Structure formats: C-alpha cells, structure tokens
Amino acid sequence: MLTLRWAKAHSNVPLRTVVGAFLAALSTLAWSAEFTVGPGDVRDGYESRDFRSHSNMLEIRPGDALPLAELVAAPPLGLPPMPVAPSAAEIDLGRRLFYDRRLSVNDTLSCGMCHIPEQGFAQNELATPVGLEGRSVRRNVPSLYNVAYMASLFLDGRESELTSQIWGPLLAINEMGNPDRKAVLASVGAIEDYAARFSELYPQGLTELTLGSALAAYQSALLSAASPFDRWYFAGIATALDEQAIRGFEVFQRRGCVSCHIVGSEHALFTDGRFHNTGAGYVRHTRSLQPARVQLAPGVFVQPTVAIEVSMLADEGRFEVTGRAQDRWRYRTPSLRNVALTGPYMHDGSLASLDAVLKFYNAGGGGDPQQDPRVQPLHLTPRELAALKAFLHALTGANVDALASDARSVTIGDVR
C-alpha cells in the first residue's frame, strides 16, 4: 500500500527506483523498536473488490522457537501418536532449510514463500501461487498442518513419503527451478554451515536422503489440534464449544460430510486420505474452454489480449498418476483441521471463502455426471449453513500462532 501511494505521487519515477526506496524504508523501519504491528493483513474478504488492507507492514520482531520435538513426542489433543519422532537437531536443521531461498535455482524462493506460516502454512492471497520468475502454478497450495499423518501427498497422491516429495517442488521449472538433484546438493553443500550440520547429524553427510529427512523432520513437527472441538469432543469439556458449533457438528454428521472427513473415537484427522470427484475438476475444465482471466487485485480481473500458455492449466487430478479413466478429476480429501485459516479452497483455489465452499456443496457440487454419488444437493437452510460454518471455525488449533512464531525464529537464508 505504501509503495502504491508513493508511486502514484511520483508516476514519472522508474519502477526499480520505487521498489528500491520501499525496501530501503523497510530496512530502516526494521531497526525501529516503536513499530510493533502484527503479522500482516487480515485477509477476510480478500476476494472482494471492497477489500482494504488494515496493516502497513509485517511484524518485524523475530519469533520464538518452540520445542517441536516435544510436540511430536506428545501430539496435541485430537491427533494420534506419531510413529516416528525426529530429533530436535533434525527439526532445527529442517526449519532453517524450509525458509532458505538458496534452495531455489536463483536464490529467490523458499518453501515457506508458498507455505506461509501466518496463512495456515498455505497461501491466502492467490488461488494458485506464483512460482519461479513469475511462472504459473496450476494448483492451490495445500496446508502443511499435520501433513506427517498423510499416506498420500500432493493433491493427486503422486508421492507417499515426506522425505522424497521434496524433489517435486525443488526441480519443477515453475516452482524452484533447479536443473537436477545433483545441483541442489551442490548448492546446499557449498554453504559451509549446512555442510557441517549434515556431517554432524548424519554419518553419510549431505545426500538426497538426508536432505529430504531434514526437511521432512520440520514438516512432520507442524502438528496442530487441541481446538475447541477437540476439547469438547475428546476431553469432554462441555463449555469448550458453543451451541451453534455443536449444531453444526450435528449437521456435519447427519448430512454425510463425516463419511470423507472422518472423526474417530479417540482422534480425528478429518480426512479419509482417499481421492474423490466432487465436480470441482469438471467446473475447472469447462472454464478452461473459455478465454482465460487474470486476477490483478481483489475483485479485479482482466481478459488478456495476447496468447498465454494454457497447457500448464490443464489438471486431471488422480488420473495423471494412475491413468485410469475413473480417476479423472479426483483429488485427495483435505483435512478440515484449521480449515478457516487456509482459504482459498479446492484443488485450484476456485472457492475463495468457506461460504463459497458451503454453497458449492449445498448445491450438489460441480455437476459432473461422474462425480461421487455422495455429493448431492443438501438443501441446507441458512441457519444450518451458519451452524456448519461455526463448526468449521471451531476446528482451529490452539497452537497456530505459536507455530507461526516458531517459523519466524530462524534467519531467512537468501545470500550465497
């Protein structure tokens, strides 16, 4: 906002001068103790043209590290035990790597620039993220909360191990852009501190496996639960959940939402981990046959007047992994934990708010003749929809702010 105002008053000044002045101003502010604003904008309603920012800058105070190894050893209320617990040293190394821009080919992107801690380890502003050098990425950023419990990774389930899934984004030309695994290892190994840390932690030093292990260790520690729902349902605290959210849970059960977003007797991941066609992929396909639109700002779209590449926009979901016709436009069921924090929603980020998601399912999904038969019009009343939304908000974990603060406890690596 500050940059835009300055640029409007100095429209004859080159853009790089504007950006340079803005960055210099931030550098000065970073040393001023009087500035103590919060972690950025509240983005409720970002999809609307009426959206207004209420914050001028990000929080500049470093975060406070958590004992994440203890969190893994004793997961929050509502989550099952973890089968394997990484060491504190592994988690610390993985945390540093996750926020290090030097893992991208040109030192500009880190994992944490798409999986933003303050935005539910997802990305709220864009339906799909912007990758290396402004390239398009076709799928919405999935949240990383509780990812360690997922048997299938990515929305199409093409990977099953956190230690190996890292190579997808690291090597994708439209994400972090590295040419091959050898180049990534050479880049990380050339940083003296990393080389020493890997040698200390692993007998084999820095390898494809140990790099994956370190990054997986941090991601597996992003456990979040002990929500108001957990305290009410699993701990039996009657006052932990208000009456509207309780009615929402009743609607959630009665209308079959729980058949895919499973709740057990002792814990709940709120996902069956399987792949389903809700019609969202069908809607995306029909839209892709129309001229593309590009979002410039909240509620502001333009129709390009030049040809744009559309091959990256095609998305057939699980079918791309299995080749089976019945898997076309099936995507992995997301967990509903912290769902109020992780919009926009669906595999392509096409639904900007929880209200839009509830409207989509209440209408019976996307209308694909081949969609899951359980996705049928629900005919919920406004009162039932409001209760269901209240229930979804009650799934926000007690430690989301602490995990975001922990993420900011490391110095971001961005200089070779």
Image (spheres, rainbow, N blue to C red):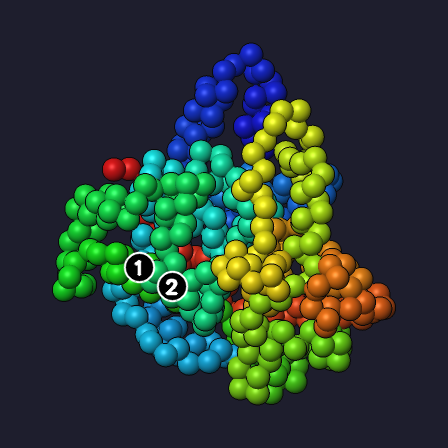
The residue drawn where x is 70% and y is 44% is: 287
The image quarter containing residue 332 is bottom right
Q: Residue at x 75, y 76 (%)?
A: 255
Three-letter amino acid code of the residue under disc 1: Gly
Residue 403 circle label = none
Which is nearer the eye, 155 or 362?
155
How far, Cα to Cα, is label 2 from label 1? 7 Å
Residue 155 spot, x, y in % from top left? 53, 59
Q: Residues within 10 Å of mark 1 (few under 14, many from 20)?
A: some
Residue 132, x across and y down, in percent: 43, 38
Residue occupied by mark 1: 212
Label 2: few (<14), some or many (≥20) within 10 Å?
A: many
Is the N terminus in the top left, top right, bottom left or bottom right quadrant? top right
Residue type of the residue flagged with mark 2: Leu
**Residue located 37% across and 48% down the image:** 170
* Disc 2 secondary structure class: helix
Q: What element carries label 1?
A: helix
From the viewer's perspective, tell me whether residue 372 is left or right of residue 334.
Answer: right
Quarter of the picture holding the C terminus: top left
Residue 399 location (% of width, % of height): 49, 67
Query: Is disc 2 in contact with disc 1, using a CB cutoff of under 8 Å?
Result: yes
- Residue 66 vs residue 161, the one in the foreground: 161
Task: Quickly name the residue at label 2.
Answer: 162
